[in-house]
Image (cartoon, grey):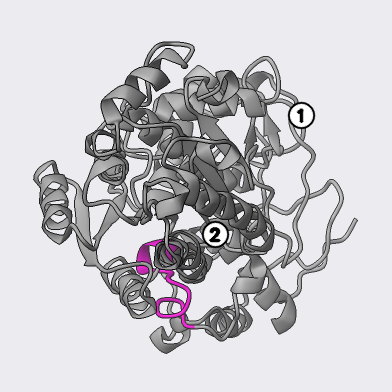
Amino acid sequence: MSTAYTIPVANDLNSGIREIFAQVTRYPLEVLDPTSGLEEDLGIDSVKLGEVFAVLREKYGLPEKLDLPREKLKTIGGIAEALQVYLRDSAVPVIGEVVAETMTAGLAQPQPANGNGHGNGSVDAATLQASVLEIFAQVTRYPLEVLDPTSGLEEDLGIDSVKLGEVFAVLREKYGLPEKLDLPREKLKTIGGIAEALQVYMAHGEAPPLVVRQPGMPPPSPVISGGNGTHGEASVIAESFAMLTPERKPFAGKVALVTGSGRGLGKDVVSYLAELGASVVVNSFHSRVEGERTVEEIKAKGGSAVHAWGSVANPEHVKAMFELVESTYGGGLDFFVSNASNGMLAPLKEITAEHWEKAFRTNVVGLHQSALAAVELMKKRGGGKIITLSTPASQGYVDYFGCMGAVKAAVESLTRSMAIEFAADHVQVNCVSPGPVYGDLLNKWPESERLIRQWEGNTAYSRLCEARDVSHFIAYLLSEPVKLFTGSVLIMDGGISSQGW
């Protein structure tokens, strides 16, 4: 059967390149306007652009060094236009239609496992490991000498599951691997282990059919099986908990804003996210000194933090806060935790119209306005996650909480609405509703000693929440694999709301 080679038409090439940008950046296609500036509009830096070109080289058989005009590298459309000219002038063959079983050597195409035809085969172990190392270097931009084949991917090299997925996308293209790979999970912890598992697979596994992708058809996302079957959602959740340790830095490269984080629960949340590797924005208003001190404490431990002074109840402050996020961390935001709160703890007969206005302005209006600003920055990252804070008192009577219980019920309702409306922008929204949390704020409640004893007695385990309990759960909800919850109000009060306050 004869093979036809054509240079892809401009529209096909533009579409194919947009698909690759979407694959590498995780941005939805509709965000990737071909005319938008990569750096200033989309937040795609030179490192991410290098990853894109690694996939382009595999897809179109491009050389390591490309002589493309630098002014064309500022937009997706410009890159497509420059590659169209390059492919035409350099006569690089690109397969323009799907061919059946016969392939011509030397073209940009997936190769069979043994490199010379269908069927089972093997590839030299040292050669395969060297090739896998080169692909890791290409995707991660790490120098080869750093990539020790025996080093742990996560703990030693900081290569997370997302980056590993990008590596497997290139491996799949290079070796014609199927979408689903039955590789032992214990082999996926080091580069050497991956090379060894691929060696065994290529020697004994069934060779996949050779399929040539037309321009515009992205490679499938990596799906890695767990040895005995598909790696399911339940095991993903278990692994996400195991990953949430400061040693692993699972949130490295992420940007998080936590409002009301100068002290109390908010401080613990923002500090824990920093321990997990996130670059954080600490926000405080009344407790400015404490907010700045929190930033210094995070930095002293090696974290990245900046302080944003302001009240979420003030639209100008909200605007300045998100402008600071944008200017400090390159224009994107991954996590927004709305912890800022304000309200009167008193019997209802003592609550005034001004108390209601202040509570709603901070807890509901401030949340809404901040969330809208957060979504705009999250869209530049292809999506993000928002966590709101409530209280089980929104569902029943609690002494002195008549005003705040009603306001937090509104927060829960707003959370559900945001979860649905923001889903189109790939933003997940959930609410964590802890019961009373040990700390200074709880000690300031009216009749705190009596109420703490009463609430402890009404829990199933005779204790209330610690701040770190809540921080752990928030971090779990922010972790990448979690897709089970959206628009959820998740109560963690030790069973008080089940037994009664």
Is the residue under label 1 in contact with that under label 2 (CB below 8 Å)? no
| Residue ID at (63%, 48%) | 173
Check residue 119 in the rendering and tell me which mark sits there, or answer none. Answer: 1
Location of residue 157 (image quadrant): top left
Check residue 284 in the rendering and tell me which mark sits there, or answer none. Answer: none
Location of residue 119 (image quadrant): top right
**Kind of residue at badge 2:** Gly
Q: Nearer the viewer, mark 2 or mark 1?
A: 2
In the rendered image, residue 327, in percent from the top left (x then y), is placed at: 29, 74
Observer-nearest of 170 and 41: 41
Left or right of 104: which side holds 280? left
Instruction: Classify the position of the N terminus by image quarter.
Output: bottom right
Observer-nearest of 108 and 105: 108
**Kind of residue at badge 1:** Gly
- The secondary structure type at the circle numbered 1 is loop
Check residue 383 in the rendering and tell me which mark sits there, or answer none. Answer: 2
Observer-nearest of 137 and 42: 42
In the rendered image, residue 70, in percent from the top left (x then y), is placed at: 39, 84
Above or below, 360 against 431 in this view is below
Left or right of 474: which side holds 22? right
Above or below, 141 against 67 in this view is above
Q: Give the main secondary structure, helix, strand or loop, of the magenta stretch.
A: loop
| Total tally of numbered discs in the picture | 2
